Image: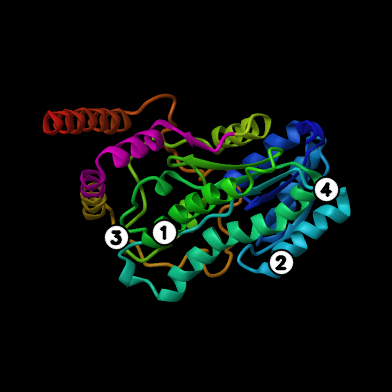
Amino acid sequence: MPAIPNAVTVITGASSGIGKATALAFAREGARLVLAARRPEALEDTARACQALGAEAIAIPTDVSDEAQVEALARAAIERFGRIDVWFNNVGTGVFGPYWEAASGLQRKVVEINLIGTMQGSAAALPHFLRQGGGVLINMCSMGGWSPTPFAASYAASKFGIRGFSASLRQELTGHPGIHVCAVFPALVDTPGLSRAANVSGRALDPKALYLTPEAVAEVVLRLVRRPRAEVSVGWPASAARLAYGLAPGLTETATGALIRAALRRARRVPRTEGAVARPIAKGTGTRSGKPVPHARGPSLGSLTLGGLGLLLGAELLSLALARRS
């Protein structure tokens, strides 16, 4: 594929958050951009910001859960630029609270947007990659694709699904070395997305944790285009979650559930909301949330604790296995 300054790059969820930050990062590198999201006005704002940086950019309003709209997005990219080099499936949403408290249709919509949207974006991109003999498909997962996310069960289901889908697709494409399938697993990111999620818990969503900046995730996406990798974590908590759940899944589930339940008990009461899951809302068009949150600059105490716990448990399990064998 051509270098980033010429790469035709499709980015979904580009009206805010990680998608917008990634669009701006690619614009600075001179990529040719095809931007997608449900909100036309916010999407046009992103396109204008990219054009102001000297990049070619077009905005194509798209609901990724609608197959016809995703196919139209791919056609628009081909009609304008003649090819697609990078496709970033970035859209993500969720429902927070006990699973049974939300309508089943709302939970299903999370899976349709996150997982089915990713599958439909991949289906739209891959025929062009196969014709060209190359391309980079990047799927946004989360550390919730490596370990459970209690009180966000449909979100976790979609992210576990995206990881399995990406890994399976990667193996189907082993005969096409120019095509790469990458999955990105960030920890908590400071975007407007959390404030736009559905919340049926009746408690405020305010995790007491360090946040990544969306620009940090965008830089990882840029690096994946330059040097594709199968899976990449962003932030120490994501790596710690992967390690802890891999070594001690039962204990990790129990600890995570206990931490979130304790946080819910302390959180202030707020009205229940369906957020932007079922339909887009005007709220939140920047890359960040706008709230004062602590941004991660290195390993947090919590992540180091989880990582250390994982290592200790791994050593204990290995010791037990050797003892039994002897």
- Say whether residue 255 is left or right of residue 116: left
The quarter in which the N terminus is drawn is top right
Q: Is residue 239 left or right of residue 52?
A: left
Name the chief secondary structure element in magenta: helix
Labels 4 and 1 touching (C-beta < 8 A) = no
**Label 1 sits on residue:** 157
- Check contact, mark 3 vs mark 4: CB within 8 A: no
Q: Position of residue 48 (x, y in %)?
A: 78, 46
Q: Residue at x 58, y 44 (%)?
A: 18
Q: Residue 234: where, in percent of width, then height?
A: 48, 34
Quarter residue 27 falls in: top right
Mark 4 to mark 1 CA distance (whole Å): 33 Å
Q: Earlier in the sequence, mark 3 or mark 1?
A: 1
Disc 3, SS: loop
How many numbered circles are shown?
4
Judging by the rendered image, the residue that carries numbered circle 2 is 69
Q: Earlier in the sequence, mark 3 or mark 4?
A: 4
User: What whole-number distance in Å separates the C-alpha atoms at marks 3 and 4?
Assistant: 50 Å
Q: Nearer the viewer, mark 3 or mark 4?
A: 4
Name which residue type carries label 2: Gln
**SS at mark 2 in the image:** helix
Q: What is the three-letter code of the residue carrying label 1? A: Ala
Foreground mark, 2 or 3, reads 2
Q: Is residue 114 magenta?
A: no
Instruction: Check disc 1: other Cα within 10 Å, few if <14, some if 14-19, many if 20+.
Output: some
Which mark identifies residue 269? 3
Badge 2: residue crowd in 10 Å (few <14, some 14–19, many ≥20) = some
For mark 4, what is the residue? 83
Q: Is residue 14 above or below residue 321?
A: below
